[in-house]
Amino acid sequence: MSLKEQLKQDTIDASKAGDNKRRDVLRMLQAAVKQVEVDDRVTLDDAGVEQVLTKQAKQRRESLAEYTKAGREDLAEQEKYELEIIEGYLPQLMSREEIEVLVKQVIMETGAASAKDTGLVMGKLMPQVKGKADGRLVNEVVREQLAG
């Protein structure tokens, strides 16, 4: 079953179960996928749907941080709930430890020595972790490794 079909089936299941909150989030995800398909005049495969879901997850993380910073716990809880559902459809992201191992390898390969080499390391690293790791976390680890 494709990712798009899975979203559709889970929406139906949530509706039948009376889980309106989950159903609404799944409908919103389906709408985001449909919007990309209409805008780009394509039919998305699993990789394309995954990209849309990754973008949605990133938006939720950013909103969650902003709402938490602003003290809006009610909105933060909704974003957290939506993020959990979205992440259920995405492959597991790499842990900080796994990212640190990759960063050390790339630093050794490139001979990077200071913070000035951040772009060089990120340029070589990001294609390896695209879709598997949060870019912000990767950037943070690279900066720490090059500073220390």
Image (cartoon, rainbow, N blue to C red):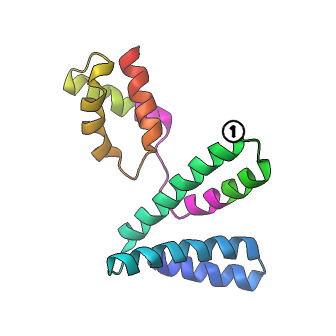
Looking at the rendered image, the quarter that the C terminus falls into is top left
Single out the residue that lies furthest toward the left.
110
Query: SS of the residue at dot 1?
Result: helix
Q: What residue is at 45 percent from the left and 30 percent from the top? A: 140
Magenta segment includes 92: yes
User: Residue 142 at x, y = what percent?
Assistant: 38, 28
Image height check: is 146 above or below 133?
above
Asked where in the image residue 50 lies, by quadrant, the reply is: bottom left
Give the magenta-colored segment's residue range.
82-100
Going by the image, does 71 lie left or right of 28? right
Indicate the amino acid at tag 1: Lys
Q: What residue is at 47 percent from the left and 32 percent from the top? A: 97
Q: Which residue is mark 1?
A: 69
User: Residue 92 at x, y = what percent?
Assistant: 49, 52
Q: What residue is at 30 percent from the left and 16 percent from the top? A: 114
Foreground of the two, 135 or 10: 135
Foreground of the two, 35 or 139: 35
Foreground of the two, 35 or 120: 35
Asked where in the image residue 52 lies, by quadrant, the reply is: bottom left
Q: What residue is at 79 percent from the left and 53 percent from the top? A: 74
User: Residue 95 at x, y = what percent?
Assistant: 49, 39
Single out the residue that lies furthest toward the top.
148
User: Residue 9 at x, y = what percent?
Assistant: 58, 82
Going by the image, does 47 lie left or right of 52? left
